[in-house]
Amino acid sequence: MGEAPGTLAASWIVARKDLAIEFRTRTAFLSALVFALLGVTIFYFAWDATAVAAADLAPGVLWVIFTFAGLLGLQRSFGSELADRAIDGLLGAPISREAIYLGKALANLVFVSGILAVTIPAVVLFYNLPFGPGIGALAGIAALAAVGLVAVGTLFSAMAVNTRMAELLLPMLSLPFFVPIVMGAAQSSARLMAGRPIAEAWPWLRILVAFDIVFVTACTLAFPYTLDE
Amino acid sequence: MTSASEPLPTARPRRDPLLGVAIVAVALVYVRALAFTPIEVRQGAAQKILYIHATSAFIALYVAFALMAIASILYLWLKDEKLDRVAESAAEVGLAFTTVVLLTGPLWGKTIWGAWWTWDARLTATLFLWFIILAYLLLRGAVEERGRRARYSAVLGILASFLVPFIHLSVYLFRTLHPMPILLKPSAPSLPNEMLVTFLFSFAAFTLLFIALLRLRYRMATLRDYVADREQERA
């Protein structure tokens, strides 16, 4: 028996456990991915392509689809701990509650980043976006949006699994919180993809950064209260 | 948990004079606003919505919602069930006031802006506040165990108070259409005296109504928990 790991080391262990489960089954990731790709293509037909330019549509589509696909991953985050009360094993481990939250969030971050890594190129391809220097900035925006989404979503996932209508409650709790993320990400990426200077996207990026800082902190502190003593 | 030694909460709640007083006061506000307050020159009769809309908005956002958030923080700290009941009651009564805001606003908007709804900063923030309170109450209904329900809803109540400024800020970047504050601003209130008096009177009446409803709702929550405890003891 070695020493109990520190918070960061412990959260990495928790994240690795979740990712190993996901990697071996791959069901949640593949379904979320197929869902995202289907969404991207279906959205294209919801507008009159001759009236609205595809490039104007793309940012909104991307971020709306991203939040919904993200929800699929978040659902599974604590849902997988329900079977055989696996959560008790985690709670009994000599690691802090915050480490459990951070580990779960980290695994979810990898999950949604993987979805974005496929969805962004798909949107660029299907919506004929200029594949220029904006792509690098888009990756940065994606990272900021993913952190915010995962911070709030992981916490609500822990709460929603213990309620009577988990599948319905998670989106209902999370979506209002995703509003500033979707707005910030869509507005800033629309400007950058249209080749506007970064100064125009800056106010929106600041909102994303502030959201990440506030909610990563608040949710880490709040998480222990969602666990049964 | 209410113990058996505690005195029984009044099984038949006595008539609450406060609620009666509040309802009469609100009725008087209507009479004064409609019959004894001048009609605004530019907006016409539509301006009268101010006496319901602005006061309800203030109470919903700055009193009910703030009370829910503060009671939530205090609950996580002190773990007193009374605080959870305060948060629950404030949320539910606040939902009623927010609904009034969202229903009366479009009536004014259609006349003055020519549109029932715009995605303006205040409108959007209020709409999402309404969604969040609704989610808060649905969450409460979806958790069986009382301690867990209190903890979960406290967490949501606190996070929601962080969220509303973010929504307001992000929609604000879109530019706002909504009239600017007329009373709560650094300079002097920009209302003629007669309107100001009606406005302040409506303010007092709606505050009274809020307190009366909150008290009733709180008493109901106390009775419900008391009954649940007795049932558990018997089982």
Image (tube, coloured by chain):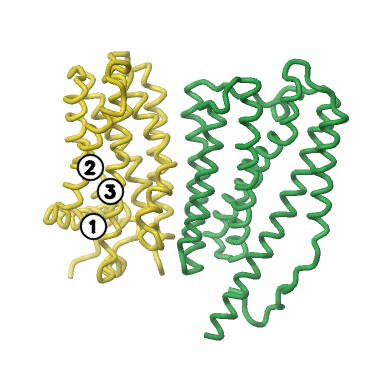
* Chain letter of the residue beneath label 3 in the structure image: A
| For marks 3 and 1 on the same chain, the one whose residue lies earlier in the sequence | 1
The relative height of residue B199 versus residue B88 in the rendered view (above or below) is: above
The residue wearing badge 2 is A35
The residue wearing badge 3 is A72
Quadrant of image for the N terminus of chain A: bottom left
Q: Which chain is yellow?
A: A
Which amino acid type is shown beneath numbered disc 3? Answer: Leu
Q: Nearer the viewer, residue A59 or A217?
A: A59
Q: Colour of chain B?
A: green
In the image, what residue occupies the spot 36% across and 20% down? Answer: A201
Label at residue A14: 1
The image position of residue B77, as x and y in percent, is: 54, 60
**View extreme (top): residue:** A196
- Left or right side of B57 for A207: left
| For marks 2 and 3 on the same chain, the one whose residue lies earlier in the sequence | 2
Q: Report helix, strand or loop for mark 1.
A: helix
The relative height of residue A53 versus residue A65 in the rendered view (above or below) is: above
- Left or right side of A157 for B206: right
